Image (tube, rainbow, N blue to C red):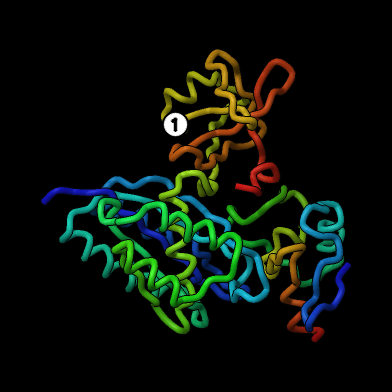
Amino acid sequence: MNKHKVYIAIDDTDEVGYYTSTGEICEDIREHIDKNHSRTTPISRHQLLLDERIPYTSHNSSMCFTCELDLETFEQVKNFILSYVADKSAPSSSPGVCMGFERDICNRDALIAYGLDAKKIVLTKESAYETAAAQKLFLKEVKNKGNGIIGALAGVALRAYGNDGRIKGKIKLGKKSIAVSELLEKGLFEEVRLKHGKTADKNHHIVINEYLKGVYIDHKSVLLLEEYGGFYKPLVKEDLLDY
Amino acid sequence: MFYKRDNSFVFKYGKKNYDKAIESAALCENFVLDKDEDELITSTEKNSCYNCLFRRWCSDSFICMKKGIYES
């Protein structure tokens, strides 16, 4: 059977003080798929609306990644994810799972609009189900109130948008500097840009203090830099909070 | 460091006062570093309420959920 691009997102798996985060559970799922079914892409973390009317635990973020599956494997993976999330999520959490084939999305713009709305306004489970059905995406409440379906669908939507989210994890190279060209050759990022959008000079060197952290822009994993006395330096976490 | 709003304890200094968040964590016996490194928004050399497992971000600041448990 032919394989096609699949989006997978989860949300709302923890509770106050819980030892496992949604990001960690998503990473476990990604590793399972990577090992058993398909190569996967890095997880993107999407910041949704921070509003006291929304029952998130601490930061209201959703996690999404993509892989390539056929129809039969899609069902196997779906069952694995539902079981894994039910098992690993916090007892009082309200997890939701969203997944679907990119080729089945009927109206990409409508889906993206949903994701952007989730960053600005309080949404309901009803609108999540309506949007998911219209875009032929699988959406499932895993336990308790299942509010995580709103964020999970938004995660898929914002990943499909391609201009939102930080890439989960940090890259440590174990050296103090690297040329832009060498970094790109390593395949760690698809593009290296200055923070105002200009493409970085491939001959310039990047001074690395601790780690490299990417964001998603134009559907690519991008490392953002700023000028630093004839060199470049990567933007740090505090600079990336708006992504 | 905090004020009470609708039975929640809100950090007075917003989301970008990194010094005050470190000062506040230094005074707190309940600080626990969030285990998810991706949710840490500042350096971990010093404890900061911004990195605490018990902070709940809101539109203008964060709410301390531990204070909510013990003091409300």
Residue sitting at x 51%, y 78%: A93
Residue sitting at x 55%, y 36%: A172
Residue placed furthest toward the left: A1
Rendering quarter of residue A174: top right
Percent of width and height locating residue B7: 78, 83
Q: Can residue A27 be seen in this view?
A: no
Subunit ID for the residue under disc 1: A
Image check: B15 left or right of B35?
Answer: right
Q: Can residue A181 be seen in this view?
A: yes
Residue sitting at x 30%, y 59%: A100
Where is mark 1, residue-wise?
A190
The amino acid pointed to by label 1 is Glu
Q: In this view, does A195 lie above or below A100?
A: above
Q: In this view, does A135 lie above or below A167?
A: below
Percent of width and height locating residue B37: 59, 54
Rendering quarter of residue A82: bottom left
Q: Residues within 10 Å of mark 1 (few under 14, many from 20)?
A: some
- Looking at this view, is A53 or A204 the one in front? A53
Q: Is residue B44 above or below residue B66?
A: above
Percent of width and height locating residue A236: 66, 39
Label 1, secondary structure: give it: loop
- Looking at this view, is A197 or A73 the one in front? A197
Percent of width and height locating residue A32: 32, 57
Image check: A152 left or right of A117?
Answer: left
Residue placed furthest toward the bottom: B72
Residue sitting at x 32%, y 64%: A137
* Total residue callouts: 1
